[in-house]
Image: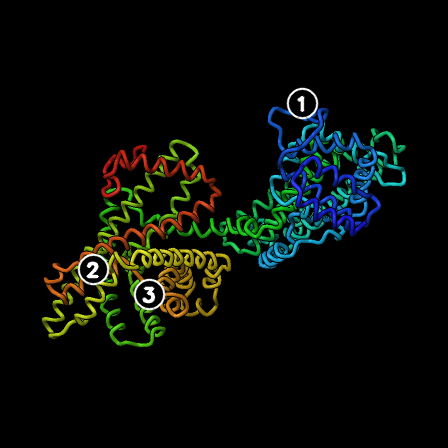
């Protein structure tokens, strides 16, 4: 049989004649074949169901299928045709029904009901490796697990869609197929499924209770700053996770009492049935309370820092709660065919999601992304000018940042003029950048291109209200204010750094009779900034580095809060003895306010210096193209070359390249940060398109709003 099946499958897969293909497949169905062959036969049948294509049917089959809904789902049409062919061939139907019953009887159903879609490992990275491995090594058909068989039979989410939408008549005929010519010696599928559902619910409730009572979750269920030991014990006993296992045992005991009180034919209708219903309702209440407690854990994580592994464990617990409720509904509605179809569809969908690495990343990083975004929103709100006073303040801050950048440019030329080894030169340049950025931070100055990565996530808060007209208007007004602020910041930086660098070069030459850089270096500088060269590409990559620094800043803020470093500093014994209680508290507050800014500016400076050296050594040539630094470099080069530079095309191409830096530095860092903000809100693509359309309409009506805060900037766009 094995050789004949293999030979047939090879020929059958090469065929595309739908009706003849099915006849040949049904003809070799053998309910007495080994388990692996029966599994492989079911896999091929499932592939035939969702393959699509035309069917060659006889007149009666065509009439029956035509009676289906006006626009039938292709899989439904194929199921109907399959059942029609089996009704016309009783021998084939007997073997198919026997295969279905035998597979259910000989397979581990709990693996599907309880474990499908649930990661096995307790940590995020273990689950990530598990999914990557399963995508490379699919399960073998001889594994006696329904989850493995479902993985091989149903390979897309479309399978879940057509299963959940099966019409009532097809569901009834499928149920009759399972019961066709079943003998008393065979275990009935309905009874086996009920036992599997009960065992799976028992397994899930034990796992939910274990995770909920763990220190990781228990410490985040409520505020427990100063309770005494008795209050802790009482609080523990009141937790739904503590009572969940006993409630499940009570349901099982009531179920067994109902079975014992019936004669096997009529359902229990006495006190045992009432008790069962009472225990089931109590279990539902506890599961709902567990879900609420899980939401409280996420709220605690959101306020007090996020850990990827903790998010993973809590998210897995929530998935188990949802699965337990789904299984409980299916168990109580055993005669509802649509409920059974929805359960199977959900299991198919969950089993498919459990194989997806992208689904794991998307589901477990959303809260972390939201936390990082919210840090940036808190910081970036100070860098959005919404009125004229804030606009003028931003100009002053940007002018201060440009003044600091003058020193940075001069030190950079001194470092490059030393002709050091590239990696060491990159390290010194990174230290130079980091020192200047930190100085700007503590002096409350502004660097234009660093702002978009910090300010774009501020808009994420307003994304929550874009479902209304007022929320959409507020979002558009914030985007316009952000672009207007960036224009002011770029202008403030460049308006100071360019002329001051030019003056510094002229003064240096007038006092010392020498130039900061040689004429050859000046020409090379202008040529390197040309729009005709790789400048736009380098400017875009620099925007990525700017965004990365804001991401690291958000991570640092999250780490500081998650590990309660502020409390550790405030209550540190040595700090209290040295600085006093008030001094230690002020130090903790200072660190809390500045840790993200320090880490962000420090990493940005080091990346601007070291990343180009590393990328150039390992991959391709890469240089930083930052609009403020480049403007200062052009100012120095122009001071060296004199008025004659105005008559050379290289100066004008360099100025055009600098303009492209301003656009790309800001646009790329803003786009990446805003994309992360959108992901943290789980917005759909059509929602993002509607936001973009509203913004464009506003710009077309009020273009001056992008450069100056006129009074109508808050009107609907």
Q: Earlier in the sequence, mark 1 or mark 2?
A: 1
**CB under 8 Å between callouts 3 and 1?**
no
The C terminus lies in which quarter of the figure? top left
The answer to whether 666 is drawn above or below residue 515 in the figure is above
The image position of residue 713, as x and y in percent, is: 27, 37
Q: Residue at x 27, y 57 (%)?
A: 445
Label annotation for residue 434: 3
Q: Residue at x 72, y 24 (%)?
A: 60
The image position of residue 506, as x and y in percent, is: 12, 67
Mark closer to the observer (1, 2): 1
Label annotation for residue 497: 2
Q: Earlier in the sequence, mark 3 or mark 1?
A: 1
Label annotation for residue 67: 1
Q: Nearer the viewer, residue 374 or 109?
A: 109
The answer to whether 492 is drawn above or below residue 404 in the figure is above
Is residue 156 among the parts visible in the rendering?
A: yes
Q: Nearer the viewer, residue 541 or 397?
A: 541
- Using a 10 Å C-alpha cutoff, classify the residue at mark 1 as few (fewer than 14 neighbours), some (14 to 19) or many (20 or more): few
Task: Find numbered disc 1 in the image and state the secondary structure of the residue it sits on.
Answer: loop
- Estimate the spatial distance between the alpha carbons at disc 3 and disc 1, rounded to whole Å: 74 Å
Is residue 254 among the parts visible in the rendering?
A: no
- Estimate the spatial distance between the alpha carbons at disc 3 and disc 2, rounded to whole Å: 18 Å
The image position of residue 575, as x and y in percent, is: 44, 68
Q: In screen coordinates, is 416 left or right of 579?
A: left
**CB under 8 Å between callouts 3 and 2?**
no
Task: Find numbered disc 2 in the image and state the secondary structure of the residue it sits on.
Answer: helix
Q: Nearer the viewer, residue 350 or 561?
A: 350
Q: In screen coordinates, is 479 left or right of 155?
A: left
Q: Earlier in the sequence, mark 3 or mark 2?
A: 3
Residue 288 image-quadrant placement: top right
- Using a 10 Å C-alpha cutoff, classify the residue at mark 3 as few (fewer than 14 neighbours), some (14 to 19) or many (20 or more): many
């Amino acid at each position: 049989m094995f050789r004949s099946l293999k030979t047939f499958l090879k020929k059958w897969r090469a065929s595309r004649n739908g009706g003849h293909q099915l006849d040949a497949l049904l003809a070799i169905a053998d309910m007495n074949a080994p388990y692996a062959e029966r599994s492989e036969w079911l896999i091929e049948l499932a592939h035939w169901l969702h393959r699509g294509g035309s069917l060659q049917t006889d007149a009666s089959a065509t009439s029956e299928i035509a009676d289906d809904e006006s626009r039938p789902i292709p899989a439904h049409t194929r199921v109907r045709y399959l059942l029609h062919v089996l009704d016309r061939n009783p021998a084939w139907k007997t073997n198919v029904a026997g295969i279905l019953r035998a597979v259910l009887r000989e397979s581990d159903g709990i693996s599907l009901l309880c474990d499908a879609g649930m990661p096995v490992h307790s940590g995020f990275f273990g689950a990530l490796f598990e999914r990557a491995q399963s995508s490379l090594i699919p399960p073998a058909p001889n594994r006696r697990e329904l989850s493995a068989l479902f993985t091989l039979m149903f390979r897309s989410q479309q399978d879940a869609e057509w299963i959940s939408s099966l019409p009532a008549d097809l569901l009834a005929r499928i149920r009759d197929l399972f019961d066709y010519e079943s003998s008393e010696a065979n275990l009935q599928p309905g009874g086996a499924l009920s036992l599997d559902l009960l065992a799976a619910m028992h397994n899930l409730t034990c796992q939910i209770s274990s995770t909920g009572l763990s220190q990781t979750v228990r410490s985040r269920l409520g505020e427990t700053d100063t309770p005494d030991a008795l209050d802790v014990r009482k609080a523990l006993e009141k937790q739904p996770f503590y009572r969940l296992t006993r409630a499940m045992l009570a349901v099982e005991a009531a179920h067994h009492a109902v079975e014992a009180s019936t004669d096997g034919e009529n359902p229990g209708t006495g006190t045992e049935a009432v008790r069962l219903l009472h225990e089931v309702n109590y279990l539902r209440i506890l599961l709902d309370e567990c879900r609420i407690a899980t939401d409280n854990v996420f709220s605690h994580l959101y306020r007090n820092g996020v850990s990827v592994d903790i998010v993973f464990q809590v998210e897995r617990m929530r998935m188990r709660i949802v699965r337990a409720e789904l299984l409980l509904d299916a168990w109580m509605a055993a005669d509802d065919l649509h409920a059974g179809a929805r359960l199977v569809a959900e299991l198919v969908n969950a089993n498919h999601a459990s194989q997806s690495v992208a689904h794991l990343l998307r589901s477990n990083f959303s809260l972390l992304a939201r936390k990082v975004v919210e840090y940036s929103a808190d910081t970036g709100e100070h860098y959005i000018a919404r009125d004229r006073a804030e606009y003028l303040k931003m100009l002053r801050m940007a002018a201060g940042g440009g003044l600091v950048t003058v020193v940075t440019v001069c030190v950079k030329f001194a470092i490059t003029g030393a002709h050091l080894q590239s990696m060491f030169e990159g390290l010194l340049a990174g230290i130079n950048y980091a020192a200047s950025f930190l100085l700007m931070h503590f002096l409350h100055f502004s660097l234009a291109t660093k702002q978009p990565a910090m300010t774009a996530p501020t808009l994420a808060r307003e994304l929550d209200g874009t479902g209304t007209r007022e929320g959409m208007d507020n979002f558009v007004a914030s985007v316009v204010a952000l672009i207007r602020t960036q224009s002011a910041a770029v202008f403030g930086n460049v308006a100071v750094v360019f002329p001051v660098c030019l003056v510094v070069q002229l003064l240096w030459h007038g006092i010392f009779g020498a130039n900061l850089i040689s004429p050859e270096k000046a020409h090379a500088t202008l040529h390197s900034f040309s729009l005709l060269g790789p400048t736009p590409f380098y400017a875009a990559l620099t925007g990525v580095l700017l965004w990365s620094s804001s991401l690291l800043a958000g991570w640092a803020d999250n780490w500081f809060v998650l590990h309660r470093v502020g409390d550790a500093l405030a209550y540190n014994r040595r700090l209290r003895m040295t600085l006093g209680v008030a001094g230690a508290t002020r130090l903790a507050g200072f660190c809390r306010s500045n840790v993200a800014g320090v880490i962000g500016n420090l990493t940005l400076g080091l990346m601007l210096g070291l990343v180009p050296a590393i990328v150039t050594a390992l991959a391709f040539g890469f240089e930083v193209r930052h609009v403020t630094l480049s403007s200062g470099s052009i100012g120095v080069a122009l001071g060296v070359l004199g008025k004659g530079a105005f008559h050379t095309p290289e100066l004008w191409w360099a100025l055009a390249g600098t303009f492209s830096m301003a656009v790309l530095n800001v646009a790329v860092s803003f786009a990446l940060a805003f994309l992360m903000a959108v992901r943290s809100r789980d917005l759909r693509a059509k929602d993002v398109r509607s936001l973009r359309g509203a913004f464009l309409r506003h710009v077309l009506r009020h273009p001056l709003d992008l450069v100056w805060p006129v009074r109508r900037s808050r009107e609907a766009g």
